[in-house]
Amino acid sequence: MNDPYEEEGAPGGVVKKFMYINRRAPYGTIYALEGLEVALVGAAFEQDVSMVFIDDGVFQLKKEQDTIETGMKNFSPTYRALEMYDVEKLYVEKESLEARGLSEDDLLVPVQVLEATALAELIDTQDVVLNF
Amino acid sequence: MLHTVNKSPFEKNSLASCLRLAKTGSVILLTEDAVYAAISGSEFSLKLEDVSTKFSIYVLEPDLKARGLGNKPLATGIQKTDYDGFVDLVCEQPVTQTWF
């Protein structure tokens, strides 16, 4: 039998559609940073990676983050580096932005803003969906 | 009494419970992810504006800046404070409690 996992990540191996759904604000918990790192692992294995930002996850992409006074690491520049790992499919839920008083202009990377119904369709096309 | 709240109002009901159960005249300080409540135009900023004469509401500026909100308009009636101001609030109030 053909094991689809056997050659995953290898040149010419199986490429799956991986979607990472980010639902948490960046600094109150470790979820956002961990989710970002796991997404980068998916990209390193040359998978077809999408990142979705919904609920408080939209705050991860807020521009002008300045953590100096809090003594925490500002990891928001990493989102700008995603492009270099060929992670270019970034989606943000419109309803989540609006509920939080944010607009697309508040975000630090180019994204596609989708309504929940469109996002539902997109999620349904994935092979692997991981929630952070 | 000083009430500190540190959780996002969009994810937990800590702020809602605080606003429901804090006595008129109380001081409320929003820290960490609770600062997201103060963004002007957000669902929670309207709730904060409704009670801005009932309570003295503060928001911790270093936590706003960390989250990219240093230059974002905030709900009216809310004051920014810093770490020294946080200490002053704790010293001024006989009791401090945290909604987390």
Image (tube, helix red, strand yellow):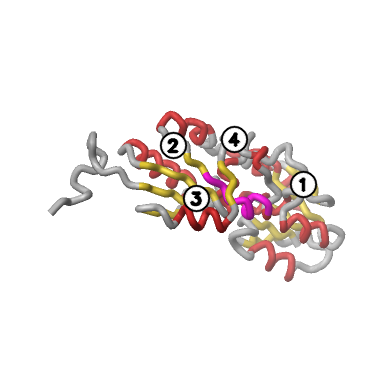
**Callout 4: few (<14), some (14-19), or many (20+) C-alpha neighbours within 10 Å?**
some
Identify the residue position indicated by label 4 in the image. A108
Q: Which mark is residue B74?
A: 1
Identify the residue position indicated by label 3 in the image. A22
Question: Gap between marks 3 and 4, in whole Å?
Answer: 16 Å
Label 4 lies in what chain? A
- Compare marks 3 and 2 and give the one earlier in the sequence: 3
Identify the residue position indicated by label 2 in the image. A87
Q: Residue at x 61, y 57 (%)?
A: B7
- Displayed quadrant of residue A49: top left
Q: Which mark is residue B14?
A: none
Q: Amino acid at mark 1?
A: Leu
Is A47 positioned to the left or the right of B21 in the image?
A: left
Is A64 positioned to the left or the right of A131 in the image?
A: right
Residue at disc 1, secondary structure: loop
Give the magenta part as a residue range: A91-98
Q: Amino acid at mark 3?
A: Asn
Q: Residue at x 56, y 58 (%)?
A: A117
- Compare marks 3 and 4 and give the one earlier in the sequence: 3
Q: Measured from the top left, where is residue A31 in percent x and y?
A: 47, 50
Label 2 lies in what chain? A
Marks 1 & 2 on one chain: no
Q: Nearer the viewer, residue B1 or A130?
A: A130
Q: Amino acid at mark 2?
A: Val
- Compare marks 4 and 2 and give the one earlier in the sequence: 2
Q: Residue at x 68, y 55 (%)?
A: A99
Give above or below for B96 relative to A13. below
Is B89 positioned to the left or the right of A72 in the image?
A: right
Q: Residue at x 60, y 39 (%)?
A: A70
Q: Measured from the top left, where is residue B62 in percent x and y?
A: 66, 40
Question: Gap between marks 4 and 2, in whole Å?
Answer: 15 Å
**Callout 2: few (<14), some (14-19), or many (20+) C-alpha neighbours within 10 Å?**
many
